[in-house]
Amino acid sequence: MPLTITAHEILDDAIRLTWSDGRESLFHHVWLRDNCPDSRHRETWERIDDVLSFDPETRPTEAALSSNGDISITWNDGHRSCFARDWLRRHCYSEPARLEHRPMPTTWAGGPGATPPRLTHDAIMETDAGLLSFLEILRDQGCCVVSGMPDERKAGEALAQRIAYLRETNFGVDFTVVSKPNPNNNAYTALELPAHTDLANREMPPGVQFLHCLVSDAPGGESILVDGFHAALLLREENPDAFDLLTSTPFDYRFHDTEWDVRWRAPVIGLDADGALREIRYNNALRAPLNVAPDLVKPTYQALRAFVAILRDPSNELHFRLGAGEMLVFHNRRVLHGRAAFDPNGGARELHGCYVDIDEMMSRIRVLGGDNLLA
Ligand code: OGA
Ligand code: ZN
């Protein structure tokens, strides 16, 4: 049953609507006038009129339900606006509606399960439903292993391109993770990589990371994942002062080699305008010398140690071995990844990687769900 408007009332500043499920929405006059459908281009659906184009004190002289259940408003300057009821409901900004619209990732300690969620290469490549479930897993749980990958260097990129174009960085459109001579980063050695987010040294670190395992013969090199959001929530519970410091104190990160010097300064725990967790940015290998006011130096080290202790607590880590023909995919702005050291003399190990950004992942989810066709 579609929801209907069962009552409406013009108040001083706003119109109050009551819905058939009992919810009340308050739409301010200024908000309604700003969102009058006539203020947009009929084809592009982009705005044409701006906030100076109407009197902010404008008010309705009349509001009426039309026969199809939509609401039409006559304004005191004679202008008329008609609002579709499902549009109004989708854009309701009451407290419960705003809570419903907030992203709700499922945080985990030690893994969303005993092993990461798994899907097959063919399910993702061959059906949109498979692609959508893959992306919803990445959005909500932050990681997935894709099995049955073709034994080809380009197979990971081809799957990533089901979402959208790839995110190029100073490491290229794609990159090969092997232990090699003259490495320009720790990933290209056989060293352990403690849990980190990639490219924390950039204004916008890549969003989704793909690591396709082509060869996994070297002893060691097991993969590690940690849910950074879970770790941040634990820190907020156990040590609120440390949490506040890590959300407000910028850390400097830097990558430099003979061709590049890329730096950014930002807090380890990024919050959005509503105070909800937005991103984790932590990469010890790229961490530059701390550069904060002198009285913050010791508390900042204490706060970082408290957070890193949570990240490295084995009960928060998910360990597994990525085999040849499998691809690890994760949300690089939330889930930290790492690997154990490996022995390059005992066998080969080769991963092939690339990135896609979060905007493209979220857009693909909306387009597959048809949300892009709604006003
Ligand atoms: C990387 C990385 C993990 C691995 O290349 O960014 O973290 O298992 N690699 O080698
Ligand atoms: Zn990495």
Image: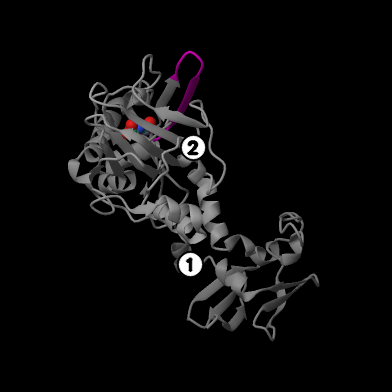
> Residue 311, relative to residue 292: is it above or below?
below
Determine crowd level at label 2: few under 14, some 14-19, many 20+ residues with C-alpha closer than 10 A: few
Stretch of the chain drawn in magenta = 256-267
Q: Quadrant of the C terminus?
A: bottom right
Marking on residue 22: none
- Name the residue: 64% across, 82% down: 69
Q: Name the residue under label 1.
A: 97
Q: Does the residue labelled 1 lie within 8 Å of ligand 2?
A: no
Of 50 and 364, the residue lying toward us: 364
Give x and y (percent) for residue 68. Answer: 67, 83
Please count the marks in the image. 2
Q: In this image, 175 relative to 305: left or right? A: right
Q: Quadrant of the rendered structure where residue 265 is?
A: top left
- Name the residue: 48% across, 26% down: 171
Q: Quadrant of the rendered structure where residue 140 is?
A: bottom left
Q: In this image, 63 relative to 295: left or right? A: right
Mark 2 residue type? Lys
Of 324 and 86, the residue lying toward us: 324
Whether residue 41 is visible to the viewer of this picture, yes or no, is: yes
Give x and y (percent) for residue 228. Answer: 32, 43
Of 322 and 151, the residue lying toward us: 151
Q: Name the residue under label 2.
A: 154
Q: Does the residue labelled 2 lie within 8 Å of ligand 1?
A: no
> Residue 149, relative to residue 46: is it above or below?
above
Mark 1 residue type? Ala
Q: Is mark 2 on a helix, strand or loop?
A: loop
> Is-magenta flag for residue 1?
no
